[in-house]
Protein backbone atom coordinates (compact mmCIF):
# COMPACT_ATOMS: atom_id res chain seq x y z
CA UNK A 1 0.00 0.00 0.00
CA UNK A 2 0.99 3.67 -0.18
CA UNK A 3 -0.31 6.90 -1.79
CA UNK A 4 0.80 7.52 0.97
CA UNK A 5 -0.34 4.62 3.18
CA UNK A 6 -4.02 5.54 3.29
CA UNK A 7 -3.98 9.31 3.19
CA UNK A 8 -3.43 11.42 0.14
CA UNK A 9 -1.09 11.11 -2.83
CA UNK A 10 2.18 13.03 -2.41
CA UNK A 11 2.42 16.57 -3.74
CA UNK A 12 6.11 17.27 -3.26
CA UNK A 13 8.56 14.53 -4.23
CA UNK A 14 12.35 14.47 -4.29
CA UNK A 15 14.07 12.29 -6.87
CA UNK A 16 17.69 11.47 -6.02
CA UNK A 17 19.73 10.80 -9.17
CA UNK A 18 19.58 12.67 -12.50
CA UNK A 19 20.20 9.71 -14.81
CA UNK A 20 17.72 8.25 -17.29
CA UNK A 21 15.73 6.48 -14.56
CA UNK A 22 15.49 9.41 -12.11
CA UNK A 23 14.62 11.99 -14.76
CA UNK A 24 12.01 9.76 -16.42
CA UNK A 25 10.40 9.19 -13.01
CA UNK A 26 10.46 12.94 -12.37
CA UNK A 27 8.83 13.61 -15.76
CA UNK A 28 6.02 11.11 -15.26
CA UNK A 29 5.40 12.34 -11.70
CA UNK A 30 4.99 15.82 -13.17
CA UNK A 31 2.40 14.38 -15.57
CA UNK A 32 0.39 13.57 -12.47
CA UNK A 33 0.72 17.07 -11.04
CA UNK A 34 3.56 16.49 -8.61
CA UNK A 35 6.02 19.23 -7.71
CA UNK A 36 9.39 17.57 -8.18
CA UNK A 37 12.90 18.35 -7.00
CA UNK A 38 15.70 16.34 -8.63
CA UNK A 39 18.99 16.16 -6.72
CA UNK A 40 22.24 14.84 -8.14
CA UNK A 41 25.64 14.93 -6.50
CA UNK A 42 27.37 15.64 -9.78
CA UNK A 43 25.02 16.62 -12.60
CA UNK A 44 22.68 15.45 -15.33
CA UNK A 45 23.73 12.09 -16.86
CA UNK A 46 26.81 11.99 -14.66
CA UNK A 47 26.55 8.23 -14.14
CA UNK A 48 25.94 5.35 -16.54
CA UNK A 49 23.40 7.33 -18.54
CA UNK A 50 25.97 9.26 -20.58
CA UNK A 51 28.50 7.07 -22.42
CA UNK A 52 26.47 3.90 -22.86
CA UNK A 53 25.62 2.39 -26.24
CA UNK A 54 22.16 3.99 -26.42
CA UNK A 55 20.44 0.90 -27.77
CA UNK A 56 16.68 0.75 -27.35
CA UNK A 57 16.40 -2.96 -27.93
CA UNK A 58 13.40 -4.52 -26.21
CA UNK A 59 13.73 -7.46 -28.62
CA UNK A 60 16.94 -8.57 -26.90
CA UNK A 61 16.43 -7.13 -23.42
CA UNK A 62 17.00 -10.24 -21.33
CA UNK A 63 18.27 -11.12 -17.84
CA UNK A 64 22.07 -11.04 -17.64
CA UNK A 65 22.53 -14.23 -15.57
CA UNK A 66 22.21 -17.20 -17.91
CA UNK A 67 24.12 -20.45 -18.33
CA UNK A 68 26.28 -19.25 -21.26
CA UNK A 69 27.38 -16.10 -19.42
CA UNK A 70 28.50 -18.21 -16.51
CA UNK A 71 30.49 -20.63 -18.66
CA UNK A 72 31.96 -17.77 -20.62
CA UNK A 73 32.65 -15.70 -17.49
CA UNK A 74 34.66 -18.42 -15.76
CA UNK A 75 36.83 -18.93 -18.81
CA UNK A 76 37.15 -15.22 -19.47
CA UNK A 77 38.38 -14.24 -16.02
CA UNK A 78 41.58 -16.14 -16.69
CA UNK A 79 42.50 -14.11 -19.77
CA UNK A 80 43.99 -10.59 -19.41
CA UNK A 81 42.48 -9.20 -22.64
CA UNK A 82 39.07 -10.61 -21.79
CA UNK A 83 36.00 -8.37 -21.98
CA UNK A 84 34.95 -9.55 -18.50
CA UNK A 85 37.12 -8.59 -15.54
CA UNK A 86 36.86 -9.69 -11.92
CA UNK A 87 39.55 -8.43 -9.54
CA UNK A 88 41.72 -11.20 -8.08
CA UNK A 89 40.88 -10.09 -4.55
CA UNK A 90 37.12 -9.58 -4.53
CA UNK A 91 35.67 -7.94 -1.42
CA UNK A 92 32.81 -9.49 0.56
CA UNK A 93 30.10 -7.58 -1.30
CA UNK A 94 31.44 -8.58 -4.71
CA UNK A 95 31.69 -12.20 -3.59
CA UNK A 96 28.06 -12.06 -2.46
CA UNK A 97 27.08 -10.63 -5.83
CA UNK A 98 29.06 -13.24 -7.80
CA UNK A 99 27.67 -16.11 -5.73
CA UNK A 100 24.12 -14.82 -6.25
CA UNK A 101 24.77 -14.28 -9.94
CA UNK A 102 26.08 -17.82 -10.32
CA UNK A 103 23.03 -19.19 -8.48
CA UNK A 104 20.75 -17.39 -10.95
CA UNK A 105 22.65 -18.50 -14.04
CA UNK A 106 20.49 -21.55 -14.72
CA UNK A 107 18.17 -22.09 -17.67
CA UNK A 108 15.12 -22.33 -15.38
CA UNK A 109 15.91 -19.08 -13.53
CA UNK A 110 16.60 -17.35 -16.85
CA UNK A 111 13.17 -18.39 -18.17
CA UNK A 112 11.42 -17.07 -15.03
CA UNK A 113 13.30 -13.77 -15.17
CA UNK A 114 12.58 -13.49 -18.90
CA UNK A 115 8.87 -13.67 -18.15
CA UNK A 116 9.34 -10.57 -15.97
CA UNK A 117 11.02 -8.68 -18.81
CA UNK A 118 8.56 -9.49 -21.58
CA UNK A 119 5.66 -7.25 -20.41
CA UNK A 120 8.16 -4.42 -19.90
CA UNK A 121 9.74 -4.93 -23.30
CA UNK A 122 6.33 -4.85 -24.92
CA UNK A 123 5.72 -1.31 -23.60
CA UNK A 124 9.26 0.11 -23.68
CA UNK A 125 8.87 2.16 -26.89
CA UNK A 126 5.43 3.40 -25.88
CA UNK A 127 6.98 5.31 -22.96
CA UNK A 128 9.54 6.95 -25.30
CA UNK A 129 6.69 7.87 -27.64
CA UNK A 130 4.82 9.59 -24.80
CA UNK A 131 7.91 11.69 -24.05
CA UNK A 132 8.41 12.51 -27.71
CA UNK A 133 4.76 13.47 -28.27
CA UNK A 134 4.96 15.81 -25.27
CA UNK A 135 7.91 17.64 -26.79
CA UNK A 136 11.08 16.16 -25.27
CA UNK A 137 13.48 17.51 -27.84
CA UNK A 138 15.82 14.60 -28.44
CA UNK A 139 14.42 11.91 -30.71
CA UNK A 140 14.67 8.14 -30.85
CA UNK A 141 16.06 6.76 -34.12
CA UNK A 142 14.73 3.71 -35.86
CA UNK A 143 17.61 1.30 -36.45
CA UNK A 144 17.48 1.03 -40.23
CA UNK A 145 19.99 -1.74 -39.86
CA UNK A 146 21.05 -3.55 -36.70
CA UNK A 147 23.78 -6.04 -37.45
CA UNK A 148 25.40 -8.58 -35.15
CA UNK A 149 28.57 -9.59 -36.99
CA UNK A 150 30.98 -12.51 -36.63
CA UNK A 151 34.08 -13.92 -38.19
CA UNK A 152 32.57 -17.38 -38.53
CA UNK A 153 29.26 -19.19 -38.63
CA UNK A 154 30.36 -21.18 -35.59
CA UNK A 155 30.61 -17.96 -33.54
CA UNK A 156 27.15 -16.95 -34.73
CA UNK A 157 25.58 -20.12 -33.34
CA UNK A 158 25.65 -18.70 -29.78
CA UNK A 159 23.34 -15.75 -30.56
CA UNK A 160 21.13 -17.83 -32.84
CA UNK A 161 20.66 -20.21 -29.95
CA UNK A 162 19.89 -17.31 -27.61
CA UNK A 163 17.40 -15.82 -30.08
CA UNK A 164 15.73 -19.22 -30.14
CA UNK A 165 15.36 -19.12 -26.34
CA UNK A 166 14.11 -15.51 -26.45
CA UNK A 167 11.52 -16.45 -29.04
CA UNK A 168 10.46 -19.60 -27.18
CA UNK A 169 9.96 -17.48 -24.04
CA UNK A 170 7.41 -15.40 -25.96
CA UNK A 171 9.49 -12.32 -26.77
CA UNK A 172 8.93 -10.97 -30.27
CA UNK A 173 12.11 -10.50 -32.27
CA UNK A 174 12.47 -10.69 -36.01
CA UNK A 175 15.82 -11.30 -37.63
CA UNK A 176 17.55 -12.48 -40.82
CA UNK A 177 20.61 -14.67 -41.06
CA UNK A 178 23.18 -13.14 -43.44
CA UNK A 179 26.48 -14.15 -45.01
CA UNK A 180 29.46 -11.85 -44.55
CA UNK A 181 29.00 -10.42 -48.06
CA UNK A 182 25.29 -9.77 -47.46
CA UNK A 183 26.11 -8.04 -44.19
CA UNK A 184 28.70 -5.80 -45.91
CA UNK A 185 26.14 -4.87 -48.53
CA UNK A 186 23.79 -3.64 -45.79
CA UNK A 187 26.60 -2.21 -43.72
CA UNK A 188 29.75 -1.20 -45.65
CA UNK A 189 31.54 -0.33 -42.40
CA UNK A 190 32.10 -4.07 -41.78
CA UNK A 191 35.51 -5.41 -42.80
CA UNK A 192 36.30 -8.44 -44.97
CA UNK A 193 36.94 -10.42 -41.77
CA UNK A 194 33.20 -10.65 -41.20
CA UNK A 195 32.00 -14.02 -42.44
CA UNK A 196 28.55 -14.34 -40.85
CA UNK A 197 25.90 -12.03 -39.39
CA UNK A 198 22.41 -11.61 -38.01
CA UNK A 199 20.24 -8.62 -38.84
CA UNK A 200 17.73 -7.67 -36.13
CA UNK A 201 14.55 -5.80 -37.00
CA UNK A 202 12.32 -3.38 -35.14
CA UNK A 203 14.84 -1.85 -32.70
CA UNK A 204 15.85 1.78 -32.09
CA UNK A 205 18.76 3.80 -30.69
CA UNK A 206 19.48 7.21 -29.19
CA UNK A 207 22.37 9.45 -28.34
CA UNK A 208 21.95 8.77 -24.61
CA UNK A 209 23.79 11.79 -23.20
CA UNK A 210 21.94 14.16 -25.47
CA UNK A 211 18.62 12.44 -24.77
CA UNK A 212 18.97 12.53 -20.99
CA UNK A 213 19.94 16.23 -21.11
CA UNK A 214 16.84 16.93 -23.23
CA UNK A 215 14.75 15.07 -20.66
CA UNK A 216 16.33 17.19 -17.89
CA UNK A 217 15.49 20.36 -19.86
CA UNK A 218 11.87 19.20 -20.20
CA UNK A 219 11.62 18.40 -16.48
CA UNK A 220 13.03 21.85 -15.65
CA UNK A 221 10.75 23.61 -18.15
CA UNK A 222 7.76 21.96 -16.45
CA UNK A 223 8.72 23.59 -13.17
CA UNK A 224 11.00 21.18 -11.34
CA UNK A 225 14.08 22.35 -9.54
CA UNK A 226 17.11 20.38 -10.54
CA UNK A 227 19.83 20.72 -7.95
CA UNK A 228 23.31 19.57 -8.96
CA UNK A 229 26.25 19.23 -6.58
CA UNK A 230 23.76 17.87 -4.02
CA UNK A 231 25.26 14.73 -2.47
CA UNK A 232 22.42 13.11 -0.54
CA UNK A 233 23.84 11.50 2.59
CA UNK A 234 20.71 10.81 4.59
CA UNK A 235 17.03 10.11 3.98
CA UNK A 236 14.80 9.93 7.06
CA UNK A 237 11.15 8.96 7.21
CA UNK A 238 9.64 11.17 9.90
CA UNK A 239 6.10 9.94 9.70
CA UNK A 240 4.52 13.08 8.37
CA UNK A 241 7.16 13.43 5.66
CA UNK A 242 10.62 12.41 4.62
CA UNK A 243 13.79 14.42 5.15
CA UNK A 244 16.49 14.54 2.52
CA UNK A 245 19.87 15.71 3.82
CA UNK A 246 22.89 16.59 1.70
CA UNK A 247 26.58 16.60 2.62
CA UNK A 248 26.51 20.41 2.43
CA UNK A 249 23.91 20.42 5.20
CA UNK A 250 20.84 21.23 3.11
CA UNK A 251 17.87 19.59 4.79
CA UNK A 252 14.47 19.63 3.12
CA UNK A 253 11.20 17.82 3.81
CA UNK A 254 9.13 16.14 1.09
CA UNK A 255 6.02 13.95 0.98
CA UNK A 256 8.01 11.16 -0.68
CA UNK A 257 11.42 10.39 -2.16
CA UNK A 258 12.51 8.24 -5.11
CA UNK A 259 16.02 6.78 -4.93
CA UNK A 260 17.30 6.53 -8.50
CA UNK A 261 21.00 6.49 -7.76
CA UNK A 262 22.07 3.82 -10.23
CA UNK A 263 24.91 1.66 -9.05
CA UNK A 264 24.92 3.48 -5.70
CA UNK A 265 21.31 2.50 -4.95
CA UNK A 266 22.19 0.35 -1.94
CA UNK A 267 23.86 3.21 -0.07
CA UNK A 268 20.55 4.96 0.65
CA UNK A 269 18.06 2.14 0.02
CA UNK A 270 19.56 -0.51 2.34
CA UNK A 271 18.23 1.16 5.49
CA UNK A 272 14.73 0.89 4.00
CA UNK A 273 14.99 -2.87 3.64
CA UNK A 274 16.45 -3.15 0.12
CA UNK A 275 18.94 -5.97 0.60
CA UNK A 276 19.70 -6.96 -2.99
CA UNK A 277 23.31 -6.05 -3.81
CA UNK A 278 23.69 -3.56 -6.65
CA UNK A 279 27.14 -4.17 -8.10
CA UNK A 280 28.97 -1.91 -10.55
CA UNK A 281 29.47 -3.72 -13.89
CA UNK A 282 31.75 -1.12 -15.41
CA UNK A 283 31.80 -0.54 -19.13
CA UNK A 284 33.93 1.72 -21.31
CA UNK A 285 33.30 3.70 -24.47
CA UNK A 286 34.82 6.22 -26.87
CA UNK A 287 33.90 7.63 -30.23
CA UNK A 288 35.77 7.61 -33.54
CA UNK A 289 35.42 8.96 -37.06
CA UNK A 290 34.47 6.35 -39.64
CA UNK A 291 34.31 6.54 -43.44
CA UNK A 292 30.79 5.14 -43.65
CA UNK A 293 28.66 5.87 -40.59
CA UNK A 294 26.44 2.82 -40.04
CA UNK A 295 22.67 3.23 -40.40
CA UNK A 296 22.16 1.61 -36.99
CA UNK A 297 23.97 -0.27 -34.24
CA UNK A 298 26.68 -2.78 -35.07
CA UNK A 299 27.37 -5.51 -32.52
CA UNK A 300 30.35 -7.86 -32.31
CA UNK A 301 29.01 -10.39 -29.78
CA UNK A 302 32.08 -12.62 -29.70
CA UNK A 303 34.21 -9.62 -28.67
CA UNK A 304 31.40 -8.08 -26.54
CA UNK A 305 31.78 -4.79 -28.45
CA UNK A 306 28.74 -2.60 -29.14
CA UNK A 307 28.85 0.24 -31.70
CA UNK A 308 26.29 2.99 -32.20
CA UNK A 309 26.16 5.84 -34.72
CA UNK A 310 26.15 9.22 -32.96
CA UNK A 311 25.80 11.94 -35.56
CA UNK A 312 28.85 11.71 -37.81
CA UNK A 313 30.84 9.51 -35.44
CA UNK A 314 30.67 5.97 -34.14
CA UNK A 315 30.54 5.20 -30.41
CA UNK A 316 32.37 1.99 -29.57
CA UNK A 317 31.56 0.44 -26.18
CA UNK A 318 32.35 -2.71 -24.27
CA UNK A 319 33.79 -4.48 -21.17
CA UNK A 320 32.16 -5.75 -18.02
CA UNK A 321 34.46 -4.90 -15.17
CA UNK A 322 33.27 -5.86 -11.70
CA UNK A 323 35.10 -3.18 -9.74
CA UNK A 324 34.21 -0.24 -7.55
CA UNK A 325 32.23 2.34 -9.51
CA UNK A 326 34.63 5.11 -8.45
CA UNK A 327 37.86 3.40 -9.60
CA UNK A 328 39.68 5.48 -12.24
CA UNK A 329 39.35 4.76 -15.96
CA UNK A 330 41.78 1.98 -16.89
CA UNK A 331 43.32 2.89 -20.24
CA UNK A 332 44.13 -0.78 -20.94
CA UNK A 333 40.42 -1.54 -21.23
CA UNK A 334 39.95 1.23 -23.82
CA UNK A 335 42.85 -0.20 -25.82
CA UNK A 336 41.46 -3.74 -25.53
CA UNK A 337 38.12 -2.57 -26.99
CA UNK A 338 39.88 -0.66 -29.81
CA UNK A 339 42.04 -3.69 -30.65
CA UNK A 340 39.05 -6.03 -30.60
CA UNK A 341 37.13 -3.77 -33.00
CA UNK A 342 40.06 -2.91 -35.32
CA UNK A 343 40.00 -5.99 -37.58
CA UNK A 344 36.20 -6.00 -37.77
CA UNK A 345 35.46 -2.41 -38.83
CA UNK A 346 36.39 -0.80 -42.13
CA UNK A 347 37.57 2.81 -42.27
CA UNK A 348 37.30 3.51 -38.53
CA UNK A 349 39.96 5.80 -37.06
CA UNK A 350 40.41 3.77 -33.88
CA UNK A 351 43.47 5.81 -32.87
CA UNK A 352 41.60 9.11 -33.11
CA UNK A 353 39.41 8.38 -30.10
CA UNK A 354 37.55 11.10 -28.25
CA UNK A 355 35.21 11.05 -25.26
CA UNK A 356 36.92 8.11 -23.58
CA UNK A 357 34.55 7.16 -20.77
CA UNK A 358 33.88 4.63 -18.05
CA UNK A 359 30.52 4.13 -16.35
CA UNK A 360 28.90 1.57 -14.11
CA UNK A 361 25.94 -0.61 -15.04
CA UNK A 362 23.88 -1.15 -11.90
CA UNK A 363 23.81 -4.98 -11.83
CA UNK A 364 21.75 -7.21 -9.54
CA UNK A 365 22.48 -10.90 -8.87
CA UNK A 366 19.10 -12.02 -10.25
CA UNK A 367 19.34 -9.75 -13.30
CA UNK A 368 16.13 -7.89 -12.43
CA UNK A 369 15.80 -4.21 -11.57
CA UNK A 370 14.48 -2.89 -8.24
CA UNK A 371 11.41 -0.75 -8.87
CA UNK A 372 8.76 0.09 -6.29
CA UNK A 373 8.10 0.63 -2.60
CA UNK A 374 10.37 -0.03 0.35
CA UNK A 375 9.82 -0.58 4.07
CA UNK A 376 8.90 3.11 4.30
CA UNK A 377 5.66 4.15 2.57
CA UNK A 378 7.41 7.39 1.60
CA UNK A 379 10.58 5.96 0.08
CA UNK A 380 10.69 4.31 -3.36
CA UNK A 381 13.51 2.64 -5.27
CA UNK A 382 14.12 2.79 -9.03
CA UNK A 383 17.32 1.23 -10.27
CA UNK A 384 19.41 -1.87 -10.81
CA UNK A 385 18.61 -2.15 -14.52
CA UNK A 386 22.06 -3.50 -15.37
CA UNK A 387 22.53 -3.50 -19.14
CA UNK A 388 19.07 -2.11 -19.89
CA UNK A 389 18.41 1.12 -17.96
CA UNK A 390 18.21 3.21 -21.11
CA UNK A 391 15.74 0.92 -22.91
CA UNK A 392 13.56 0.51 -19.81
CA UNK A 393 14.17 3.87 -18.06
CA UNK A 394 11.16 5.78 -19.40
CA UNK A 395 8.73 2.91 -18.78
CA UNK A 396 10.16 2.47 -15.29
CA UNK A 397 9.39 6.12 -14.58
CA UNK A 398 5.91 5.86 -16.03
CA UNK A 399 4.94 2.78 -14.01
CA UNK A 400 6.56 3.91 -10.78
CA UNK A 401 4.82 7.30 -10.97
CA UNK A 402 1.54 5.42 -11.35
CA UNK A 403 2.31 3.31 -8.28
CA UNK A 404 3.37 6.28 -6.15
CA UNK A 405 0.29 8.32 -7.03
CA UNK A 406 -2.40 5.64 -7.00
CA UNK A 407 -1.00 3.32 -4.35
CA UNK A 408 -1.55 0.39 -6.72
CA UNK A 409 1.33 -1.62 -8.05
CA UNK A 410 1.16 -2.01 -11.84
CA UNK A 411 1.28 -5.72 -12.73
CA UNK A 412 4.46 -5.20 -14.76
CA UNK A 413 6.35 -4.12 -11.63
CA UNK A 414 5.42 -7.11 -9.45
CA UNK A 415 8.61 -9.11 -10.23
CA UNK A 416 10.80 -6.10 -9.47
CA UNK A 417 9.79 -5.63 -5.79
CA UNK A 418 12.74 -3.90 -4.11
CA UNK A 419 12.13 -5.88 -0.91
CA UNK A 420 12.41 -9.32 -2.57
C1 LIG B 1 29.26 0.60 -21.69
C2 LIG B 1 27.78 0.58 -21.38
C3 LIG B 1 26.86 0.40 -22.40
C4 LIG B 1 25.50 0.35 -22.13
N1 LIG B 1 24.62 0.25 -23.17
C5 LIG B 1 23.29 0.29 -22.93
C6 LIG B 1 22.38 0.24 -24.01
O1 LIG B 1 22.78 0.21 -25.17
N2 LIG B 1 21.03 0.24 -23.74
C7 LIG B 1 20.56 0.25 -22.45
O2 LIG B 1 19.34 0.19 -22.26
N3 LIG B 1 21.42 0.35 -21.40
C8 LIG B 1 22.76 0.36 -21.62
N4 LIG B 1 23.64 0.44 -20.56
C9 LIG B 1 23.09 0.47 -19.18
C10 LIG B 1 22.59 1.86 -18.82
O3 LIG B 1 23.60 2.80 -19.10
C11 LIG B 1 22.21 1.92 -17.33
O4 LIG B 1 21.39 0.84 -16.98
C12 LIG B 1 21.45 3.22 -17.03
O5 LIG B 1 22.14 4.33 -17.52
C13 LIG B 1 21.20 3.37 -15.53
O6 LIG B 1 20.54 4.61 -15.33
P1 LIG B 1 20.25 5.15 -13.87
O7 LIG B 1 19.51 6.41 -14.04
O8 LIG B 1 19.67 4.06 -13.04
O9 LIG B 1 21.71 5.40 -13.23
P2 LIG B 1 22.83 6.51 -13.56
O10 LIG B 1 22.74 7.01 -14.93
O11 LIG B 1 24.12 5.94 -13.12
O12 LIG B 1 22.40 7.71 -12.62
C14 LIG B 1 22.54 7.69 -11.23
C15 LIG B 1 22.78 9.12 -10.77
O13 LIG B 1 22.69 9.15 -9.35
C16 LIG B 1 23.61 10.10 -8.86
N5 LIG B 1 23.85 9.77 -7.45
C17 LIG B 1 24.31 8.60 -6.95
N6 LIG B 1 24.34 8.65 -5.61
C18 LIG B 1 23.89 9.87 -5.24
C19 LIG B 1 23.67 10.53 -3.98
N7 LIG B 1 23.94 9.91 -2.81
N8 LIG B 1 23.20 11.81 -3.98
C20 LIG B 1 22.92 12.44 -5.16
N9 LIG B 1 23.10 11.86 -6.39
C21 LIG B 1 23.57 10.59 -6.41
C22 LIG B 1 24.82 9.92 -9.77
O14 LIG B 1 25.62 11.10 -9.76
C23 LIG B 1 24.17 9.65 -11.12
O15 LIG B 1 24.03 10.83 -11.88
C24 LIG B 1 25.02 0.48 -20.79
C25 LIG B 1 25.94 0.70 -19.76
C26 LIG B 1 27.30 0.76 -20.05
C27 LIG B 1 28.25 1.03 -18.92
Image (cartoon, helix red, strand yellow):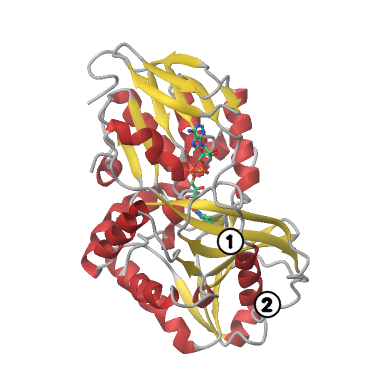
Residue occupied by mark 1: 143
Name the element at disc 2: loop
Q: Residues within 10 Å of mark 2 (few under 14, many from 20)?
A: some
- Quarter of the image where the N terminus is located: top left
Residue reaching furthest top? 240
Label 2 CB-ligand 1 distance < 8 A:
no
Q: Nearer the viewer, mark 2 or mark 1?
A: 2
- Which quadrant would the C terminus be assigned to in this image? top left
Is residue 399 visible in the rendered image? The answer is no
Q: Helix, strand or loop at disc 1?
A: loop
Q: Which mark is residue 342?
A: 2
From mark 2 to mark 1, how far is it between C-alphas?
Answer: 23 Å
Whether residue 158 sits left or right of residue 18 in the image: it is left
Can residue 214 be seen here? The reply is: yes
Q: Against 373, is 53 above or below?
A: below
Residue at image location 44% in from the left, 36% down from the top: 260
User: Dividing the picture into quarters, in which one does residue 160 lie?
Assistant: bottom left
Amino acid sequence: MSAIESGSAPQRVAVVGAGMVGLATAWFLQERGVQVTVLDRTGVAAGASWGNAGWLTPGITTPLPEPAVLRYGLRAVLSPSSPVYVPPRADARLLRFLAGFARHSTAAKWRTAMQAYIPMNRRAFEAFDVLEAAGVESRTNEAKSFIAAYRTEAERAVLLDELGHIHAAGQEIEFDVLTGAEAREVEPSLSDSIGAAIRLHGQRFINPGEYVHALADAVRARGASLVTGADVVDVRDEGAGVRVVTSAGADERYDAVVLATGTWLGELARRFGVRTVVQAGRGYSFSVAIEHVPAGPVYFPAQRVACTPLGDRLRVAGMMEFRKAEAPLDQRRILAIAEAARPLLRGADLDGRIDEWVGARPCTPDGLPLIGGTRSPRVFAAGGHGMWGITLGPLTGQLLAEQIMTGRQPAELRPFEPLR
